[in-house]
Image (cartoon, rainbow, N blue to C red):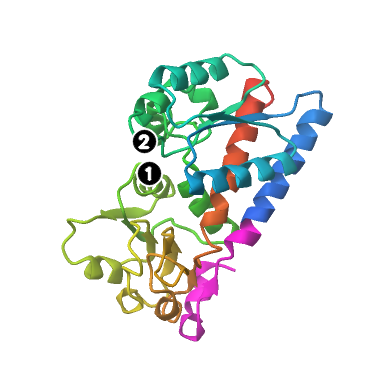
Amino acid sequence: MSQDSNASSATSGAQILDGKATAAAVRADVAAGVDALVAGGGRQPGLTVVLVGEDPPSQVYVRSKDRAATEAGFRVETVRMAADSQQADVEATVRRLNGDDGVDGILVQLPLPKGLDADAVTELIDPAKDVDGLTKDNIARLVLGQDGLVPCTPAGCIEICDRHGISLSGKDVVVIGRSHLVGKPFAQLALARNATVTICHSRTRDLEAHCRAADVVVAAVGVTELVKGSWLKEGAVVLDVGINRGDDGKLRGDVEFETARQRASAITPVPGGVGPMTIAMLLANTLETSRRRQGRA
């Protein structure tokens, strides 16, 4: 269903952009791609995750990545390192993986324990294996409009739009949040789709006015229900990237969902919206790197 067809029905409630179903479709496509690669004489894509320390959310996330990658037919390895690992040891691990021809994707799980320089570790990753899309080489390629690996969460936002017939071309897009993980790369991806992009942040004056003028609002700032439903233009598309746990234990996004869905034409829920897309796009990136490295792109 297209954005334009949704707009006419916004008052009766927005279309819910189901990230779980979309991610499942992406993972199925990846699995089919792996089968075709192997059937054509190629080897299994290899994904290695480096996990330093015992951060509980990271542990859960890495287990989910391992399971999804295994189901897609990848060869999966998790390198577990102690929380008191030295910078030199973590960097040596990344260098070893760079030189391993069986590893197509390297992901260093963030955050790293205090005392470790995450930027230095990330920058050591071979850009051709940087499936998180965080090295300077891949960031530069994104800004320049060249082929490269794109950060998974903003890529997932674009994939949700594409698979639901939502065009960004000619649209006024407001991105709330300027992180290098989501806000900035999404802005570049939207520009590449011929959107007019405004990036808002903590110093933005009159955030409400910016939201009221937007055809598409992307909220990625990490503040529970910062964006009120009354701020939205009738028929706007809302991509809520925020995941915030309240005192009641429930997960909520950066957008006031129940009121927003009455004005929006389409909206991602929290949970079950953008979140599931991150791992799905990680798998898509890893398959792509494997194809390229095997000369089968």
Magenta region includes residue 128: no
Q: CA distance from mark 2 to mark 1?
A: 6 Å
Q: Quadrant of the C terminus?
A: top right
Answer with the quarter of the image where residue 174 lies. bottom left
Check whether the beta carbons of the residues at disc 2 and disc 1 lie within 8 A of each other: yes
* Location of residue 192 in the rendering, given as x and y in whole percent from the top left corner: 42, 44
- Can you tell which mark lies on residue 188? 1
Judged left or right of residue 130, residue 44 is right
The amino acid type, in three-letter code, at marker 1 is Gln
Label 2 environment density (alpha carbons within 10 Å; few <14, some 14–19, many ≥20): some
Answer with the quarter of the image where residue 243 lies. bottom left
Q: Quadrant of the N terminus?
A: bottom right
Q: Is residue 117 above or below residue 236?
A: above
Location of mark 2 (residue): 143
The magenta-colored residue range is 1-22
Judged left or right of residue 267, residue 210 is left
